[in-house]
Each structure stands twice: as C-alpha cells, then as structure tokens.
Image (cartoon, grey):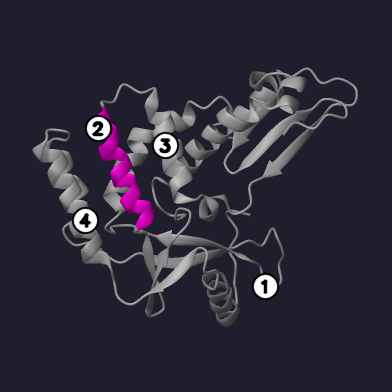
Amino acid sequence: MGGATVIMDTESYREEILRQLQDTDVYSPLSKDPKWDILRKMKLLVDNAYANDLIDEKLHTYLIPPNPITPMLYILPKIHKRLQDPPGRPIVSGVDSVFSCAATFLDKVLREFAVGAKSYVRDTTDFLSRLSCLDFGEGDMLVSFDVTSLYTSIEHELGLNAVRWALEGSGYKPDIKMFLLSLLEIILMDNYFLFEDRFYGQSRGTAMGSNVAPTYANIYMACLEELSIYPSTPFKTVGGVDEIYRRHLPNMEGFNHGATVVP
C-alpha cells in the first residue's frame, strides 16, 4: 500500500490527527516555538565538543543549521487497516529543521549497530533468501509479530540505554560516546512540531520522519532481543537465532516448530 494514492476528506484527516494528539502520554501542547532555545542548547553541546577536539570544524559547522525551519506534522492513512476513516501513521517532517543535520549524522554513526543485529533483515529479497535455507518439517509454519506503534512507544530512558548498550563494544572513546548520547537526547527530549497554528512536544518515542528514527528503533529492538528474547527459555527450546528468528522493523518473523511458538 506504500505506493497508493489516497483521497481523504479534509475534516476526517484533521480529526484523525487531533485524535492522536489527545494522547497526553505522548504529546503535549507548547506555549511557543522552542526552535531557538533548542538551537542554543545544541550549539552549546557542539561548541564544547569542538573545543575539546571531539569533532572537526567541518562537522561543527554542519551540525548547527543557520536558518532552521519548524517541523510539521502530517499523517499517512493506513488503508491496509481499513478503508473507511483509516487510522493515520504520524510523520514529522523535519527536513531542514533544528534536528535535521544532527539526526543525519547520528544515523550515519549508529547505523552499523542496527544492521549488525543478529536478527537484522535488509529487505524482502534478503528475507526470502534466508527462508530458502530453512528446513521445514511437518507441523512447522511461519509466524509474524508486529510491534504496535513502536516509534511512539519507546521510552526515552530505555531507548538511550539501548544506544548506550550498543556503543559499549565500540571503539569510541568515552567522551565521544557521551557526545553522541547527548546529541541524541536533545533530538528525543526536545522533539516538537507544528500542526495548524499550535506547537506540540513529543514526550515519548521518536518522530517518524527523523533520519535517525529507524536506526534508533532498530537498536532498541536489538537490545531487547539480546537481553530478553534470546536468553528466554522458550527461545532456547526451539533453536538458535541464526535459524528461526528475523526482524524487519517493526515486524518480527519466526519459525514455529510444531506447537512451540517462537517469541
């Protein structure tokens, strides 16, 4: 459905966005545009990193956009869920925003930890290739699990801890790791957008539309798998990750051996 053109009643579209914005666990109205306050905070962090030789002049200049624009919220109707008044997938368009360059930089740095996960699947072709290597027996079947609203469900503290976990085994020095985490924290904690004539902050999860969002969510899932799923008794009972468990964000595919369901 990703390539479909959807014609939707304007008021229904607007009501769906307002319905989602009523979730006070995720969104909260702001009294003003926080753009310049965020830019000052980010500049302080980046200036300090440059002064301590953590980044070079080129990256220092790149990370601070001179004239950032305000992120805007829109939704993509999920017509695969239902055609009449479909729910919407919230997207924050952050192109050229105060977060844009930092998110692009972090995505480039952190992506290796996402694609290095044991369960990582690059695309459909990769998944089908892996399936062809499986030995299916009588009573076996493929099962699929979906993480509901993953992007907006990741608690900031848990997500940052997952990235910290990923960086532990890297060759980055402690002060570099702290800089990366601090930059990511600003993107997460200060994420905001405009809808109609009102500003909103996002207090949980990450914005779909941010360059670093897929990598961030993949690292979170990889951490969850390593610390909770792979060590679990049901998972050990049916075999190893190399054979039966794969993930293509935000879905998880497993191999059901007989009556035992892979978590």
Say the numbered circle drawn on residue 97.
Answer: none
N-terminal of the two: label 2 or label 4? 4
Looking at the picture, how far across and down is residue 109, in whole percent?
33, 34
Say the numbered circle drawn on residue 163.
Answer: 3
Q: Is residue 56 left or right of residue 252?
A: left
Residue 83 position (above or below residue 97): below
Mark 3, Cα crowd under 10 Å, few <14 / some 14-19 / many 20+, is: many
**Is residue 209 or residue 51 the one in the foreground?**
51
N-terminal of the two: label 1 or label 3? 1
Choose top left, top right, bottom left or bottom right for residue 95: bottom left
Contact, mark 1 vs mark 3 (Cβ under 8 Å): no
Residue drawn at 48 percent across, 29 percent down: 115
Tell me, yes or no, whether the highlighted magenta stretch contains residue 11. no
Does residue 6 appear in the picture of this structure? yes
Tell me, yes or no, whether the highlighted magenta stretch contains residue 183. yes
Residue drawn at 33 percent across, 77 percent down: 31
- Looking at the picture, which amino acid does disc 3 mark? Val
Contact, mark 2 vs mark 4 (Cβ under 8 Å): no
N-terminal of the two: label 3 or label 4? 4
